[in-house]
Image: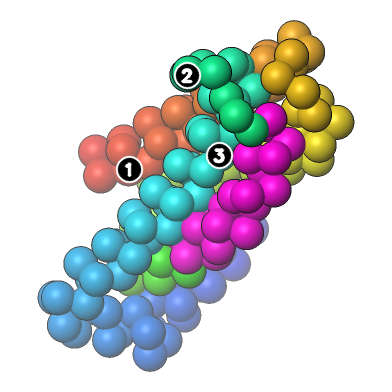
Amino acid sequence: MHSLLKSFAEWLENTPVPLFVSDYPWTYQVVQFTHFTGLSLWLGTNIGLDLHLLGVGPKRKTSAAQFLKMTIVWNWIGLFIAAVGGLTLFSTAATTFIDNPAFETKIFALLPIALIWHIVVQVKTYSWGQTSDVPKVAKVAGAVEILLWFCVATAAVDIPYF
């Protein structure tokens, strides 16, 4: 399985987009900026919802469900931008990344769990967040989601050190 993954990574590194990004140093920074912009939009709306569920902040004029309705499109646009930027960054050094334990932890363990948990929180928020009195299970779910995204970010920050 690893040899198949390694072959795919070598092929990916030699496709036109990563070669272009590698040939012009400024393009890597543009792609990285794009990735971070998407992450900011994605995580900002995620954490905003989670804080709504936790009841953190001043008295809200909107319920968690209303907040989700206002931000859900931006949330998924942010994920799309982050994913495109992340895949492009990955493609420039795929053979290096697939052997990196921090990258493996982020992509294969933490990220799928965090994404599934996020979808559950979004779906349940419509029933949990109808009023300002949020059930305890929603508060726990919001706290767990913040913790999961913190773990994903910690793994991402560790990638350059392996």
Q: CA distance from mark 3 to mark 1?
A: 23 Å
Q: Identify residue type, mark 3.
A: Asn
Q: Relative to residue 104, is residue 28 depicted above or below? A: below
Identify the residue under disc 3.
46
Mark positioned earlier in the residue sequence (3 or 1): 3
From the image, state whether disc 2 or disc 1 is nearer to you. 2
- Return the residue nearer the eye: 69 or 94: 69
Q: Identify residue type, mark 2.
A: Gly
**Residue 63 percent coordinates (x, y):** 68, 30
**Residue 11 percent coordinates (x, y):** 46, 80
Identify the residue under disc 1.
159
- Let me know if residue 66 is in the magenta part: yes
Q: Residue at x 59, y 16 (%)?
A: 55
- Return the residue nearer the eye: 54 or 116: 54
Res 135 quadrant in image: top right
Q: What number is the disc on residue 57?
A: 2
Q: Is residue 5 left or right of residue 100?
A: right
**Mark 3: secondary structure:** helix
Q: Relative to residue 131, is residue 120 depicted above or below? A: below
